[in-house]
Image (cartoon, grey):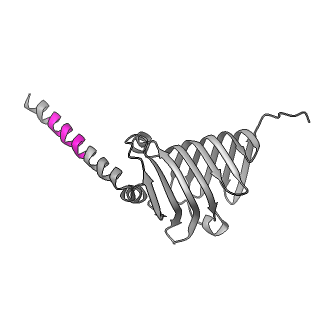
Amino acid sequence: MRKIKLFFKLILIFLILFVCVLLILFFNPKSTINLVDKIFLKDYDVVFSDIKFNKSFLTPEFSIKDFSLENINNVQLFEIKQVEASIDVVKLITRQELSFVKLHINNFSNFLSEDSQKNQFKTSQKISGKNLIIASDDFNFRSDLFALKSLNNNIMLIFHNGSINSNKFLNLKAVKHANKVQYLFETNLTKKI
């Protein structure tokens, strides 16, 4: 009986500590981003100028201005003027996979330029999500579901049900390995050829 009480006390202490840590992280979003950067993006450095956060526990939503990602050699992989995103915390903890409920990217530059692609994915990365929108003055991309998987400089991007500018697609897959990129584009034709 004493072991059961001790077990429940330990569970209660763990839950209280967990909630306290979450509260600290949610009320200080810069610390949250820095923690995600240190734990899940070990080979990269996240840089930003301003962040706003909605403090939801299971799907926190945030808006970041002047966001960029640099590799360990301080090479900028990309720069984005504004990012709005919502993360699935359950998948982040259980699968150690960054999973977005929403990801909107506005006005990006230097996105995976030739210099930024050198040795950028030495570790395994898995990113997935829903409701992806990437927009700039001359480019609009939308996808209902997406996934990025990388291992040893091999990258696979998968998109489902979306559009590039006004061209709709069912599935879009891009695979980069050994300095070659292969694409698979599946669509429904709406006009007769």
Question: Is 14 positioned to the left or the right of 113 in the image?
Answer: left
Question: From this viewpoint, is residue 41 visible?
Answer: no
Residue at the (43%, 59%) spot, across then down:
37
Q: Nearer the viewer, residue 85 or 192?
A: 85
Q: Residue at x 23, y 46 (%)?
A: 17
Residue drawn 49% across and 68% down?
72
Q: Is residue 125 visible to us here?
A: yes
User: Percent x, y for residue 159?
Assistant: 65, 42
Asked if 107 appears above or below 14 in the picture, the reply is: below
Residue 14 falls inside the magenta stretch: yes
In the image, is 46 to the left or to the right of 182?
A: left
Q: Residue 43: x percent and y percent?
A: 47, 63
Q: Quadrant of residue 38?
A: bottom left
Magenta segment, which residues? 7-17
The rendered magenta stretch, by its main secondary structure, is classed as helix
Report x, y in % for residue 104: 58, 49
| Label tally | 0
